[in-house]
Structures are given as C-alpha cells and as structure tokens.
Image (cartoon, rainbow, N blue to C red):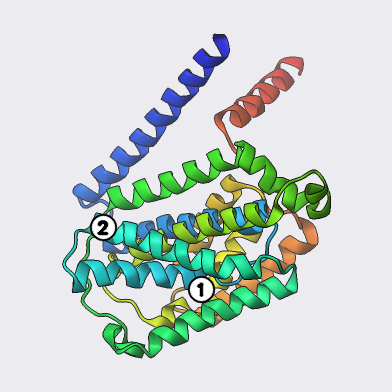
C-alpha cells in the first residue's frame, strides 16, 4: 500500500512539474516575452527531442544501428501535409496518418533488414532513407524537388509539448515493461536471448516500428511549423544530426537523449551563420566523447527527482561531517 502511495505522490509531482513548465512557456509566448526567434528554437528542441528519444529506442536500447531516421520523418511530414493541405482533413488526422505511414514503412523495412547486424543494417537503413528522398523528388503530386510550400501553421506550443511528453512517456514505459527487458536483452547479448527463447527479430521490429512512428510524428510537427518541406531537408545529414544527439546523450538513456537534443539545438542556433563550423564541431564533439566518455554524457543512467535528492542528501551529509 505504501509503495502505491509513493508512486501516486511521484506521479502527481511529475504532473505538476510538467504543468508548471507548460504554463510558464505558454505565458511567455502569449505575452511576447519569447519572440519569433526563440519560438523557432523551442519548436526545434521539441522536434529534436521526439527524434532523439525515438532513435534512442532503436540505437540505444535495442542496439541496432539505424541511419535512416530522417526517411521516416520525411514520410510523416509528407503524409500529414497531403491529408491537411491537399485533402482538407484536420490536423489530428494528419498526425495519425503521419504515425501510421511511418510505422508501416518501418515495418516494411524492418522485417527484412533487422535480420542483418552491424554495418549491414546501417547500410540498409541508410539506403532506405535515400530511397525515400529520391522517390519524393520524383513525385509530381508533392512538387518533386521543389517540395510543398505555404503549409498552414498548425503546430503550436501545446501540440509540441504534448508530442514530446507522449513520446518520452511511451518509450520510458516500454523500456520498463517486459517488452523493454526483452529489447534490452537483445542489445546485451542477442545469442543468449535467442537461447532463452526470446524472438529477437520480433522485438527488434517492435522497437523499430515504434521509433519510426514517432519519427513520423516529428515530421508532422516540423511540416506544420516551418511552412515548407523539401526532400532535401530529410537527407543523410539530418539522420546524422539525430544520431549525434543519441550518441552524445548516452546509448541507453532517455534523459541523455533529451539533454543532448536541447544542447545540439542550442548549438545549431548559435552557429546558424557558420554551417561548416557546425559540422566540424559535431565531429569534434563525437571524437571527444568517444575518447573520454564513450558511453555518452549519461551512459545508461536516467535523471530523476530521486537522483537530485540523493545528490542533495550526499552534499548535506558531507557538509555535516565537515
């Protein structure tokens, strides 16, 4: 009974923190304290959080190297725009269509390719991302290389916040479930997992499809915030950006993926006028992380209120001893 009570108290505290954060940002936007520049960066942070957390499920927790996440984002972006702009459907329908289309693509590419391992899987997913990009360039219905212009801005702060929170909650709860333990076992030792009777291909496909669905959700948010989508926007470099966030944050840490997404977005905004320097810094960050902290900033650990409580208690005890 006490355990359930403690869980309920922690849940209420988390809800209050999220509600306070949402209300504070919404107040800043409504009063104009956050101008258009900061609102764009805020939207980019939320979209990158969705992308990094969803890719962390595939690369970090499942241990599969996917380099085609931008392809799923492109599928979601175009699917949502087709429904909202060309077929006149509401935004929520476009979001569901984006998740469904990306999830179906994830299943189609995941079933054959997830039997591969290591570099072979990375090459296959990279090829998928390029196939999606080139295919979109040759479809006249979506204006080919020119992309779709003048997309109605339907993505607002409530949509962005809800999408980021839902993505994080789904991934965290999945990892903490029996399915999550099976997924992590695949990462730790796939051969041992198979010997224990775990259908490794099944759990890899589940993680891949869920990750792809949320990448599609990020694509829908992106398309209806930035007014324009082009196939070239979702090239290999976009997948590389997302991969950097996951590796920097720590393979196997959702909080690390969130922290890295916020950091990389802020760094990108600060270096907007110097795209070449941005790529050099990305490479340097990866090299430094791989040398001095190969497990990433957070490794496989998670930030929580309990973590801060332990840190505070440790410092307080040390102060008392002194």
Front in this rendered view, residue 78 or 247: 78
Mark 1 vs mark 2: which is more N-terminal?
2
Please tell me whether mark 1 or mark 2 is closer to you in this view.
Answer: 2
Query: In the drawing, does residue 320 fall left or right of residue 195?
Result: left
Query: In the drawing, does residue 41 fall left or right of residue 207?
Result: left
Reply above or below: 236 against 246: below
Read off the residue under disc 2: 93
Residue 129's x, y, as percent? 53, 77
Residue 238: give its label: 1
Q: 10 Å neighbourhood of mark 1: few (<14), some, or many (≥20)? A: some
| Figure label count | 2
Residue at image position (24%, 67%) is: 83
The Cα atoms of the two marked residues, 1 and 2, are separated by 26 Å
Residue at image position (73%, 64%) is: 288
- SS at mark 1? helix
Splitting the image into 4 quarters, where does residue 117 fall?
A: bottom right
If the image is split into quadrants, where does the N terminus sit?
top right
Front in this rendered view, residue 257 or 7: 7
Query: In the drawing, does residue 58 fall left or right of residue 92?
Result: right
Residue 14's x, y, as percent? 44, 30
Residue 89's x, y, as percent? 19, 63
Reply above or below: 261 against 147: above
Asked whether residue 120 is in view, the answer is yes
- The answer to whether mark 1 and mark 2 are in CB contact below 8 A is no
Residue at image position (75%, 68%) is: 118
Q: Residue furthest top?
A: 1
Q: 10 Å neighbourhood of mark 2: few (<14), some, or many (≥20)? A: few
Residue at image position (60%, 73%) is: 125
Query: In the drawing, does residue 310 fall left or right of residue 109?
Result: right
If the image is split into quadrants, where does the C terminus sit?
top right
- SS at mark 2? helix
């Amino acid at each position: 009974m006490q355990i359930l009570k403690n869980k309920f108290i922690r849940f209420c505290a988390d809800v209050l923190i999220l509600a306070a954060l949402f209300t504070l940002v919404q107040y800043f936007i409504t009063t104009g304290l956050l101008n258009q520049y900061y609102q764009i960066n805020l939207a980019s942070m939320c979209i990158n959080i969705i992308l990094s957390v969803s890719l962390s499920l595939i690369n970090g927790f499942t241990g599969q190297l996917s380099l085609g996440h931008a392809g799923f984002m492109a599928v979601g972006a175009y699917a949502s725009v087709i429904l909202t702009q060309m077929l006149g459907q509401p935004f929520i329908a476009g979001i569901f269509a984006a998740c469904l289309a990306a999830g179906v693509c994830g299943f189609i590419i995941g079933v054959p390719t997830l039997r591969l391992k290591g570099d072979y899987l990375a090459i296959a997913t990279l090829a998928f991302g390029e196939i999606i990009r080139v295919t979109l360039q040759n479809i006249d219905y979506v204006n080919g290389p020119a992309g779709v212009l003048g997309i109605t801005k339907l993505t607002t702060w409530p949509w962005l916040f809800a999408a980021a929170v839902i993505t994080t909650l789904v991934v965290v709860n999945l990892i903490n479930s029996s399915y999550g333990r099976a997924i992590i076992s695949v990462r730790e030792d796939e051969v041992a997992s198979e010997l224990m009777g775990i259908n490794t291909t099944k759990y890899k496909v589940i993680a891949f499809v869920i990750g792809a669905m949320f990448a599609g959700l990020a694509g829908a948010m992106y398309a209806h915030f930035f007014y324009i989508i082009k196939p070239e926007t979702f090239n290999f470099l976009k997948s590389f950006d997302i991969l950097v966030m996951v590796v920097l944050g720590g393979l196997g840490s959702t909080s690390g993926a969130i922290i890295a997404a916020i950091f990389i977005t802020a760094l990108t905004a600060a270096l907007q006028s110097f795209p070449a320097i941005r790529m050099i810094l990305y490479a340097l960050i990866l090299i430094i992380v791989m040398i001095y902290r190969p497990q990433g900033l957070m490794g496989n650990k998670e930030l929580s209120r309990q973590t801060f409580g332990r840190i505070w208690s440790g410092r307080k005890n040390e102060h008392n001893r002194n």
